[in-house]
Image (cartoon, rainbow, N blue to C red):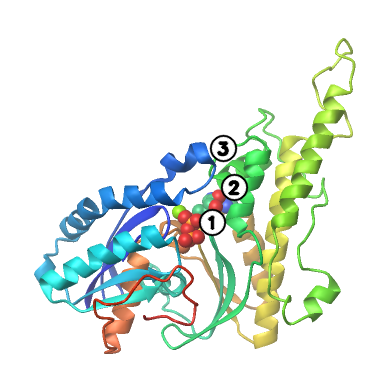
Amino acid sequence: PLVLGIETSCDETGVGIVRGRTLLTNTVATSMDEHVRFGGVVPEVASRAHVQAIGPMIEKALADAGVALDDLDALAVTAGPGLSGALMVGAAAAKGLAASTGLPLYGINHLAAHVAVDLVAPDSPGLHTPTIALLVSGGHTEILRIGDIVDDIELLGATIDDAAGEAFDKTARLLGLDYPGGPSISRAAAGLLDGSGVPGDPAAVRFPRGLSTKTDLRDPERRFSFSFSGLKTAALRTVTAAEAAVSAQPTDAPGAGEPSPGAPRLADIAASFEEAVVDVLVKKTLLACEDTGIRHVLLGGGVAANARLRARLAERCEAAGVTLRVPPLDLCTDNGAMVAALGAEIAARGRAASGLGFGVLSSLEVDDVLV
Ligand code: ATP
Ligand code: MG
Ligand code: FE
């Protein structure tokens, strides 16, 4: 089926069109720049940006794909989870299109769509099921067991406080680095922000690994859960200590203003922080494989852009004989193609459409794939 998908759950206005498992276009506008000065996504700002972008983005996607509205077989839109106001803009646009064309409309789950997107990746081997999915973004940190992309998704664990991307964003802010924090921290860790070009030592600072003690790992409630809020506090303490070490030196001493030999450099702090986040994500994902006997892992969400995460996960998966799929990064961050991909899969199975009466659900559960 030829399906147009609309995504507006956070700060990306995405419209994608797929024909079955072939991606025709993936058009994305983001309001990220408007959130920079706030250090995080501001819901009202995101909603307004969606209102401005949604019409032109739909037009552009149709034009790019060389498709007329009449050619489409179905529409799909993210119904949740996400920011209510942002979701409403996409849902209203999709319902308007459905009402004016008579096309069936599927209201679908954003998290399932992050997994389904691999169906339309250019180099996709198809979606191996069962698979363990690690979804890591600014709003999500989840380990899922995917038995079937429409009918069998189980949440194994999630973060109990900050999402992984949020931890990067908040810690970057403490370190005086730009939003979004993920890329900034990676650049700092590579030694690119202090002019040294010398990569940081990931073992320089021992940051906490949340919910990873033996007791945590034995507790079924905590085994696959994450906690990243302690990292912020630890990072703040480390930065304060490093600054104190600098200012404690007499100002006329040689090397004044330079960090004292014992104090960690920015690159060390950033690399150690990155390592702490990656350690926990990789460890728990492989534990999920072990517990379930599943030999396939799929990585999704904006934090998949983290090179250290991809490298460590690839290394550990290979050692464990587990295959790893990482869709192209523009399909990992929020986009419309993922919504169209899941919509097409649901339509191909002949499922009843959602109708026009559904409401958006900011905390839609992951096993509610179709509303
Ligand atoms: P949602 O949570 O609904 O998927 P989002 O907009 O918060 O939406 P994405 O756009 O998928 O999520 O990803 C953005 C997040 O990814 C930000 O928190 C950003 O810091 C993080 N990120 C981007 N690049 C990197 C990187 N290289 N390393 C770590 N984190 C990164
Ligand atoms: Mg985003
Ligand atoms: Fe997302």
Say above or below: 253 vs 61: above
Residue 204 in percent (x, y) is at 82, 45
Give the amino acid at mark 1. Answer: Gly
Name the residue tied to disc 1.
138
Say above or below: 53 vs 297: above
Quadrant housing residue 229:
bottom right
Asked if one can make out residue 20 in the rendered structure from this viewpoint, the answer is no
Q: Looking at this view, is 23 or 252 the one in front?
A: 252
Mark 2 residue's CB less than 8 Å from ligand 1: yes
Residue at 83 percent of width and 69 percent of height: 213
Query: How far, Cα to Cα, is label 2 from label 1?
Result: 8 Å
Residue at 68 percent of width and 40 percent of height: 174
Mark 2 secondary-structure assignment: helix
Query: Which circle marks residue 178 in the picture?
Result: 3
Query: How far, Cα to Cα, is label 2 from label 3?
Result: 8 Å
Picture quarter with the C terminus: bottom left
Residue at 48 percent of width and 49 percent of height: 41
Mark 1 secondary-structure assignment: loop
Residue 75 in percent (x, y) is at 24, 72
Say above or below: 326 vs 44: below
Residue 317 in percent (x, y) is at 65, 72
Quadrant housing residue 347:
bottom left
Residue 186 in percent (x, y) is at 62, 45
Q: Looking at this view, is 175 or 330 the one in front?
A: 175
> Neighbour class for label 2 at 10 Å: few (<14), some, many (≥20)?
many
Name the residue tied to disc 2.
169
Q: Is residue 133 left or right of residue 214?
A: left
Give the amino acid at mark 3. Answer: Asp
Disc 2 + disc 1, Cβ < 8 Å: yes
Q: Earlier in the sequence, mark 1 or mark 3?
A: 1
Mark 1 residue's CB less than 8 Å from ligand 1: yes
